[in-house]
Image (tube, rainbow, N blue to C red):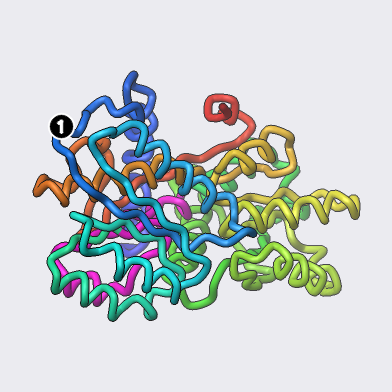
Amino acid sequence: MQKKTLTTLLMLALLTACNNDVAERRKPGYGEASAPISQEVKITVNSVDKPDSLEFQKLMNAGVLAAGKDYPTVKLKIEQAPNQEAQIQQVTQSAADSKAIVLNIANNQAVLPLMKDLCAKKIPVVFFGASPDKRALADCPLDYDLRGDDMTAGVVQGLLVAQAFKDNPAMDKNGDGTIQYAFMKATQGTEFTRDRSDWAVATMSSYPELARPVSEVLVSYANFDPALGLKNLEAWLANPNFSKVEVILTNNDDTAIAIANELKKRGINIPVYGSDGGEVGLRAVKSGLLAGTARGDYQQWAHDAVRVAANLGLGKPPLEGLPTSYRMEERTIYPPFVGISAKNVDEFLK
């Protein structure tokens, strides 16, 4: 009982931060360099970028370009590496001419020597998009990680599902009062997947006035690959237990959209929920293809990562110029997520 109470209190605290963030982002000037950077500072931004980048990666790249326009005193050197090895080589060469570095990495273990080298040279690093090794981050007091609050993403997604079951009793196909779900998760064994998944399930089963029993019918891992998600879906469809599934949850929109499209082709009506909330995900919610998504503003977060790097390069507090709703724990900066459904999707579409 005590554990359940603590879980509920944390859910409420995270959602309060989400609501505050939405209000703050709607204030005039936010995201438009309303707090200019007066001093010149050289920053290198390096991202491992592939032609088949997922939508959130494209949005992050766009955010970096927008920061360059919004902060003219920040002299950006923007690099894109085809793989992790190339990124390490590029950053090693660029470091000497940079006051701080912004990194979107592909492999957090492969960059450990680079992190140690940059720390020894007293060059701050801000990670975005993919998190560094926690121990390595703790070892260098100059480094920061700006990442989506995946616990909040899970809470928000779980709340969307729980609210939908309350608003639409027909979603409970067998009328037993239990949410029978299938979960197409991202990468097995990662904190990202654990937080987004476990908190979604905990919210469905524990959130005040919406909680109901839950039952996991099927679970698979798609590793952010929609094609693998569809392969796993084929196995699900061949499983007799699939007939029990009342809702499908995923850890990212690209996989959710692939699954929802395949179900639609087959005439199978099961609501699918994503997580990321980029333009493609929002459009999928608007069209009714997705039932909902947890929105993370990846373009703005990349923009903010440049701001943090500039702050560090100038010796200023890392959070200067960012929304007050952003929370920081042990040099990890967490922007929150927002729940998107048909009720509010128009507010976020461009």
Q: Quadrant of the N terminus?
A: bottom left
- On screen, residue 124 versus residue 71, left or right, reads left
Q: Is label 1 in a helix, a strand or a loop?
A: loop
Q: Is residue 299 left or right of residue 268?
A: left
Name the one closer to the observer, 194 or 148: 148
- In the image, residue 118 sits, relative to residue 46, either above or below, namely below
Residue at image mark 1: 38
In depth, the one of 87 and 154 nearer the eye is: 87
In the rendered view, would you say 336 is above or below 214? Answer: above
Task: Assign the C terminus to one quadrant of the image.
Answer: top right
Q: Which residues are magenta?
A: 127-155
Furthest-top residue in view?
28
The residue shown at (32%, 46%) is: 76
Q: Measuring 58% from the left and 56% from the top, which residue is drawn there?
A: 252
The spot of residue 148 in percent (x, y) is: 39, 52
Q: Answer yes or no: is residue 330 visible.
A: no
Depth check: give the residue in front, 6 or 253. Answer: 253
Where is residue 145 drawn, in percent x and y? 29, 59
* Position in image of residue 176 (x %, y %): 70, 56
Residue 239 visible within the image: yes
Residue 324: image quadrant is top left
Left or right of 288, for residue 83: left
